[in-house]
Structures are given as C-alpha cells and as structure tokens.
Amino acid sequence: MLVERFHEKRNDFLKEACSDLIKWCRPADQMVGRNRSDLYWRDNFSSPDYRFNEGDVGSFLKTFLLARWVRWDLARVRDSLSVYRESGMDSLDSRIEGLSKELGHLLVYARTGLPRPYAQQTSAATKFSNFIFPEEPVFIWDRLATTSARMRQHIRHSETVVRIECPRYFTNARKEHCYVSYSAACLAALKEEQIRPDFRAALEKARAELVSQGSNLAELDGKGGFLERRFLDKLMFHEGKWILSQPRKQ
C-alpha cells in the first residue's frame, strides 16, 4: 500500500530535508552557489529598514523557481510587497490569499511586456510572506507541499486510499486556492512533528551543523520557530515529490 511505503521512506525524507536545511539556511552573508541563503531573505525582507528593490525581487523569484515560465512586472511587485509589509500581520492567512490574487495581476508577456493576468500566485505569496513575517506560522504552498499535506490529512483521518493527482484539495467553493485550510493542515502537521523524536533529532543535527558553519543559534532560530517551519517545509517538499513519483494506480 502507498501509505505503508510512505512510512517506510520516512528516514530518507528526513535526511533529504536535513541536507536541504543545512544547504539553504547558512549565514546571511554566505551564498548558496549563485543564490542568496534563506537567512539573507529573512533578515532583509522582515526588516523595516530594508527597502524592496527590483534586483532583489527578481533574484528572489528566480531562486524560488517562480520565474521559470512567467515574467513579472518587478516594479509593481516591489511596490506591492512594500505596502503588504507595512500593513502588518493581522489576519495574515486571509491577507496571503489576497496577496496571491494581487500578484496574479503582476505578470506580463515576455515579448510585449503587456499585462498577463493570472488567477492566483499562491506559491509566490506564501514564499514572500514566509520571509517578510518570519515570526508568523506561514507555510509555503506548492504542488509538492500540498500533495504531502493531503497525504497527511488522509493518514490523520485514517484514510487508506489516496488518489495521486494534481492536488485540488485545498480549494474553496469557487475552486480558488484556499490558503486558510492549507495553513490549518500544515499547523496540525507541525504539532505532530514537534513531538516526534526523529524529527527533533534531525532538526538538532541541522542546527549543530549550521552553528559550526558560523551561524548564531539565537539568530538562526529567530522568533516564532522559523527554522523549525523551514524544516517542515523541506520535509513536506520531499514527501510530496516522492508521492507524485509513484504510479497513480495502487
């Protein structure tokens, strides 16, 4: 059964997530190849003294694979993020849904530069929000993470049959992305992981390695469990990647 094999792969998922965390959460002044580290984006985007600029916005979109198939109006994205950060953290889950729709109107055609409206950009909205408000429980939305969240929901509710397909589970009555329900599912997953010894041990291993690379532990974790959530993000990424690689008929 798929669920049984999913459980059997647990150690592999944790190792892959630990490796990713060590790779991407190195000190803010260290590069990850040609890309900035997660802590660079967190420390800058969350700072009231930082001013969003087109260069950083474009680099962020490329680093987080948000510009592979689309082109953005970087000046308008810059301005949108500035207003978004200044608006604060109240009702953040709902505001992420609003940002997702707003960003959907900031795409342009590559050849002409003319607007190319798109319904939602929930992945971009959650990725920006994760670093703008690192103290808040923001969870990154993408095809792999939502697939993992669906699997976890099935296991949580003692389901034994899981359909492997492009996820449509976290949607509202209008068939729009529903980040609010996805966030609730991820928060439940985080609470479950927090009491699992293997999750805690893998996270501590990553922390120790990052400190050995020059990270300050207090700055690394920040407030609100930033590093812990990033570890869950990466764990769910690898879980979802594996699930979608499996044959559809089980």
Image (spheres, rainbow, N blue to C red):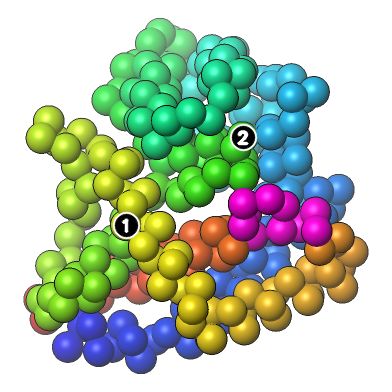
Residue 100 appears anywhere in the view: no
Region in magenta:
218-227
Q: Point out which mark residue 185 bears.
A: 1
Residue 229 drawn at (x, y percent): 54, 59
Q: Which amino acid type is shown beneath numbered disc 1?
A: Ala
Q: Quarter of the image for the C terminus: give it.
A: bottom left
- Write the residue at 36% across / 62% down: 188
The secondary element bearing badge 1 is classed as helix
Q: Which amino acid type is shown beneath numbered disc 2?
A: Ile
Could you say which quadrant of the image residue 3 lies in? bottom left
- Most common secondary structure along the magenta stretch: helix
- Write the residue at 53% across / 30% down: 89
Residue furthest right in the image: 214
Residue nearer the viewer, 249 or 223 = 223
Crowd tier of the residue under label 2, counting other residues whose Cα lies within 10 Å: few below 14, some 14–19, many 20 or above: many
Residue 176 drawn at (x, y percent): 20, 34
Q: Point out which mark residue 132 bears.
A: 2
In the image: residue 95, left or right of residue 57: left
Please check the rendered image and state whether residue 235 is part of the magenta-colored stretch, yes or no. Answer: no
- Write the residue at 48% across / 28% down: 90
**Depicted 198 relative to depicted 90: above or below:** below
Residue 85 drawn at (x, y percent): 59, 24
**Depicted 118 relative to depicted 246: above or below:** above
The secondary element bearing badge 2 is classed as helix
Sequence-wise, which precedes: disc 2 or disc 1?
2
Please check the rendered image and state whether residue 221 is part of the magenta-colored stretch, yes or no. Answer: yes
Q: How far apart are marks 2 and 1 (CA)?
A: 22 Å
